[in-house]
Image (cartoon, grey):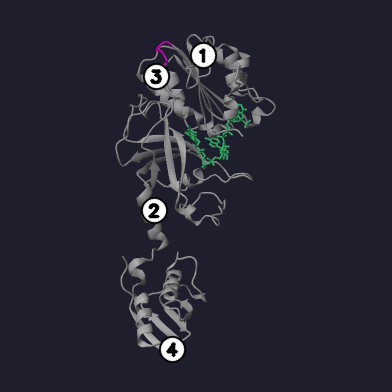
Amino acid sequence: MGQLIEVVVTLIGKAALFDLDRTLTGQDGLSFPEPPDDTKSPPELLAQRLFAIDDQIERVHVLSNLVTVTRAGEWDDEALAVATDVLSKLLVFYEIESPEDRIARLRNEHYNATITDIRAHGPDLWVIKVTPDESIKPFKPGQYTTLGLGFWERRADEAMEDFEDDQDQIEKMARRSYSVASSMVGEDGILVEAHPADVEFYVVQVRPDETEIPALTPRIFSRLIGDRIYMGRKFTGRYTLDGVQPTDNLVLLATGTGEAPHNTMTAELLRNGHRGKVVSVVCVRYRRDLAYTSQHATVEGRYPNYRHVALTTREPENEGNKLYIQDLITSGRLEDELGAPLDPVNTHAFLCGNPAMIGLPSQSDDGSLQFPERVGVSELLHGKGFTIDRPKERGNVHYEEYWRDL
Ligand SMILES: Cc1cc2nc3c(=O)[nH]c(=O)nc-3n(C[C@H](O)[C@H](O)[C@H](O)COP(=O)(O)OP(=O)(O)OC[C@H]3O[C@@H](n4cnc5c(N)ncnc54)[C@H](O)[C@@H]3O)c2cc1C
Ligand SMILES: NC(=O)c1ccc[n+]([C@@H]2O[C@H](COP(=O)([O-])OP(=O)(O)OC[C@H]3O[C@@H](n4cnc5c(N)ncnc54)[C@H](OP(=O)(O)O)[C@@H]3O)[C@@H](O)[C@H]2O)c1
């Protein structure tokens, strides 16, 4: 609730000048020859109330702390008293909120967690830690939750969003899914423990292009340690190690930040003394797009059943010599790295990231599968007798698409 405004009135013919003890507009002023449709700002609300309360009013003009009200008839004591009352009580019901107060209120209303660490691997690739206000509910390695920031937060890029048609949009939240990431070992080289007090995420900043202005990542990349954020309370997804036996071999195949859940799974497998072989492949554009390289090296050094392979596609040496994960399968290199054949009887494949790498098929009514034109990993593994994991039929090719190919 705002306070009463003090009002001093001066009459000049048909115009009453109300001098207020606070400012309602900038130096341009606002003129209302009729009641405004909107009541989003105090001057609009004031004009609408004055027109509503006195049908003789012809015009309301608001300039800084001066409100000039022109009336068709003479001003009498009663008309002046009514208008003065409306003016003095304007802010009792309408607290003027500064932009800073509005942002503080919205953050308070929507955020439930704090960014407690940011490890920047270049301007567009971050490993962040988020500590929720309430304790973290248990989750399985491979699952994901939601991060969110309000549209009111500033962007790290130069893109201009157009909220013209929907002014309310600015008070809404941009929410997206993020796999729970995990470092596998600490600085001491010891395996990290499960479910600590904070949650790690591995996030790439998506750049705007002609077709899309990304909503969330440019806002995440404008944040600092200590800033508040929204994190979903629920962790979800069936991209987990359920059904994997301790002696099974695993191939973890990722593009970009798709290695996030694989590292969380690897830490879990090693904590549980997994005896099968594990090979983790990640394919990125440039070497600088790899944030966990030293972690993989440490784990490889300590666990003979763990192998890591990183592929780049846009470094100078990749010119005319680009290898995708699919190429590792067709050439037999994936089996060499695994040290075992890709046998569907004892092998699980986990595919995460770019949907074109995963290459999921659609299914016809007769049950036959139509794979995409560009060959993805799913088709190659299907050809070797693997089954794609579906909600109604457990399989050994598990997938998490980070977006949908249109
Ligand atoms: C289950 C699930 C888990 C996810 N986990 C992660 C994660 O751990 N780390 C992460 O960075 N992203 C993850 N994503 C993607 C994430 O949800 C967002 O889509 C992404 O961060 C971009 O958000 P945005 O609002 O900036 O852009 P959006 O408008 O959501 O996306 C715009 C476009 O950016 C591209 N894009 C989106 N995500 C990626 C990505 N990760 N790598 C490359 N290109 C991308 C796509 O072309 C997409 O159409 C996950 C998505 C899903 C469905
Ligand atoms: N990575 C960067 O340097 C960088 C920098 C700034 C911003 N970004 C933003 O990050 C977003 C995504 O970048 P990202 O590189 O992490 O993800 P990405 O575009 O999915 O690329 C990751 C890897 O997947 C490969 N790939 C592409 N199509 C494939 C297919 N059909 N089969 C198998 N592999 C395939 C890519 O090779 P190709 O080289 O052939 O595409 C690349 O090596 C972009 O939208 C961009 O806005 C990235």
> Given this view, does label 4 or label 1 mark the residue nearer the observer?
4
> Given this view, does label 4 or label 3 mark the residue nearer the observer?
4
Instruction: Assess disc 1: are there few (<14), some (14-19) or many (≥20) residues with their C-alpha within 10 Å of its C-alpha.
Output: many
Instruction: Assess disc 2: are there few (<14), some (14-19) or many (≥20) residues with their C-alpha within 10 Å of its C-alpha.
Output: some
Q: Establish if 309 lies above or below 342.
A: below
- Return the disc, 2 or 1, that comes first in the chain's sequence: 2
Q: CA distance from mark 3 to mark 2?
A: 41 Å
Residues tagged 4 and 2 counted as in contact (Cβ below 8 A): no
Q: Position of residue 309 (x, y in %)?
A: 53, 22
- Return the disc, 4 or 1, that comes first in the chain's sequence: 4
The stretch in magenta equals: 242-247
Q: Position of residue 237 (x, y in %)?
A: 43, 28
Which dot marks residue 106? 2
Which residue is located at x 41 percent, y 72 percent? Answer: 49
Residues tagged 4 and 1 counted as in contact (Cβ below 8 A): no
* Element class at badge 1: helix
* Element class at badge 2: helix
- Residue with the mark numbered 3: 269
Which dot marks residue 74? 4
Which dot marks residue 56? none
* Element class at badge 4: loop
Q: Position of residue 43 (x, y in %)?
A: 44, 71
* Element class at badge 3: helix
Q: CA distance from mark 4 to mark 3?
A: 86 Å
> Given this view, does label 1 or label 3 mark the residue nearer the observer?
3
Q: Quadrant of the N terminus?
A: bottom left
As drawn, is 339 to the left or to the right of 18? right
> Given this view, does label 2 or label 1 mark the residue nearer the observer?
2
Q: Amino acid at mark 1?
A: Leu
Which dot marks residue 338? 1
Q: Total of numbered circles in the picture?
A: 4
Q: Establish if 237 lies above or below 26.
A: above
